Amino acid sequence: MDETGIGIWGVPLAIFAGAIRVSTPFIFVSLGESITERSGRINLGLEGTLVFGAMTAYAIAVMSNSPWLGVLAAMATGAVFGLIHGWICKFPKVNDIAIGIAMMQFGLGLAFFLGKPFIQPVAPHLPSIPLGGWADLPQIQSALNINVLFVIGALLSVALWWAFKNTRVGLILRVVGDSSDAARAMGLNPDTVRLLATAVGGSLAAVGGAYLSLFYPGSWNEGISSGQGLMAVALVIFARWNPIGCFLAALLFGGAGALGPALQSVGVTHGYYLFYAAPYVLTLVILVATSSPTRSLAGAPGALSITK
Amino acid sequence: MTIEVNTPTLSPSSTDARSLRPLLEWLARRAEPVAISLGAILAGLALFSLFILVVGKSPADLFRLMYTGGFGSWFSIQNSLSRAAPLLLTALCVALPARLGLVIIGGEGAVVLGGVAAAAIALPLTASVSPIVVIPLMAIAGMIAGGIWIGLAGVLRHYRGVNETIASLLLAYIAIALMNHFIEGPLRDPASLNKPSTAPLPAEYMLGNIPGMDVNWGLLVGIVACIIAWVLIEATSFGFAARIAGGNVRAAQIQGLPVGRLIVGFTALAGSSAGLAGMVEVAAVQGSANASLAAGYGYTGILVAFLARHNPLAIIPVAILLGGIDASGGLIQRRMGLPDATVLVLQGTLFVVILFCETFYGRFKIFNPDLWKSPSLSGRPNLSGRTA
């Protein structure tokens, strides 16, 4: 790679650029999952939703030549996946964690099945905003080439943070998530609230998938996701169910994910496969540091099964 | 909500029926899981048929091909059995911790590291040490590597309260990165060009086939492991304690059971089982450690374990069934022009429907003797303690 311009400074710049590029799917999946978990349910199936969303977005974008139509279609299929998960989980004795694993396998299988014809064609990409236009160096220009979805995700996290605190819908979600009984006493139906929260969570996760296939890496294939959907679940726990925390944590994970490619680009090749493990190691370390064997996590919704 | 209106004197029960009653109760309780599982499989197949109809193919043709490809000839049966072998071991990786109420989904990581460890210990020895020593050493290395990996998820669960489902999955991704590091770096055979792998094992250091069959010894290893696991759970105090702790951790702690040791022990055993699958894959199929170790056996094993309701003996037929479905994938692809992921769609559908059908346990009066009209038993709370 070209090092003549900024030399070793290329590494932090590449990590910064990578953080922005890699974090966007994490932002959407974790915001979606935070809505679902706030309502007291956990959806591990978001990995499948993410991949299915990536496939749908790509296929629709190829067929309609409009990436935004692809994103919308992905949102719709994500909502359907969420509705299925939410509907199944409202029956007694059904384990939401196990159903999540099953929905993940179902979503992956269906995406690979229906997506087979779309591995070759090329879809139009999502647009990005060239914020680096002022700079002379191409590295800085490409680093500041920020995708629209990243901006939307950032705004959405602030909006959600505000909505959880200040709106009626936010209050309903929090009450249902903390205690089904309290919600019923208020005349709310916890199952319906959770069903809708899971559907919204699914549609946001699918946007994360659409970003993967329509911007970075920007093609559809069967290995497009490497666990982003599941890591987002851990990320939400780390962010303590706070949407702004989710956004910052997603940036951190994105930066960790960009470490391997960034080092490779400046010629560090020794052991760089180990750097590919960085986001997973980081997630695990954070989980270990923030969990406790004796008490449930601060800020955890009371009805959530995973933190007990 | 049912209100019992029958008074004891009103309920008719002849002496004949009374003597048959224990047998009927026993049958009813045994019949429930079988009937619900079969019903779930049929419902899953019906949904899948619908899907196949929607994409414009004939489900009847598909199921016929599936039978032909999986079990239609001696050749295809052997193929199915070969594919079942690793599934037996990876399913145990899910089923054993499930006894303690733990959901482990990272078996793939233990498979991968088990394979790498087996190759790493064998390759320096193949020049001088006899296969009779090296092959067991490979198995032990694979089991230790896998056991440490999944055992770590158990340690984190018990001592740090980290959710084991997510931790085990993260560990699986880390394991795959470690494998890539080893087969691209320190253990790489320079002769492996576009598919990095360790040096190949000499033929005499490989596990051969079971005599008279085209199936390697891994199948037998898997079946024996399932039987051992069944005995462990059903017939030892270790397994009994695990079942108590799985039912209620607090109760187990109050009774002084070593919950921490149970959790670490069961997860480590589970991991060593999946690690053994990796060793078999290296020593019987691949002949070297390479990226093919991450072929998804760990994930299919999750499905096998849930289908078998975490019963190690039930894992044997379920693994063979899924091995057969897997084996028929190629035939379906060639003859019907369907993508190879068809098998994945079927597996996913079955998985979702079967978990959904958990909700029917205890709902059917016919399977629940406690709800039968009877003077002595009416109104008794359900204490049967169904295990998940």
Image (cartoon, coloured by chain):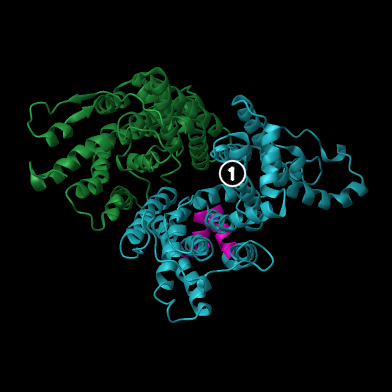
Q: Nearer the viewer, residue B76 or A67?
A: B76
Q: Output the letter for the chain in green.
A: A
- Whether residue B259 is in magenta: the answer is yes
Q: How many marks?
A: 1
Q: Secondary structure at mark 1?
A: helix
- Over which residues does the magenta segment extend? B239-262
Chain letter of disc 1 in the image? B
Which sits in the foreground, B275 or A11? A11
Q: Quadrant of residue B128?
A: bottom left
Q: In this figure, which residue is indicated by the disc labeled 1?
A: B330
Q: Nearer the viewer, residue A102 or A60?
A: A60
Dominant SS in magenta: helix
**Percent from the top left, x then y, of residue A219?**
36, 33
- Quarter residue B234 falls in: bottom right
Residue A14 vertical placement versus B156 (above, below): above
Q: Quadrant of the N terminus of chain B?
A: top right
Seen in the picture, residue A107 relative to B73 is either above or below; the reply is above
Label 1, residues with CA under 10 Å away: few <14, some 14-19, many ≥20: some
Chain B colour is cyan
Does the magenta segment cover residue B129? no
Residue B362 shows up from this direction: no
Q: Amino acid at mark 1?
A: Gly
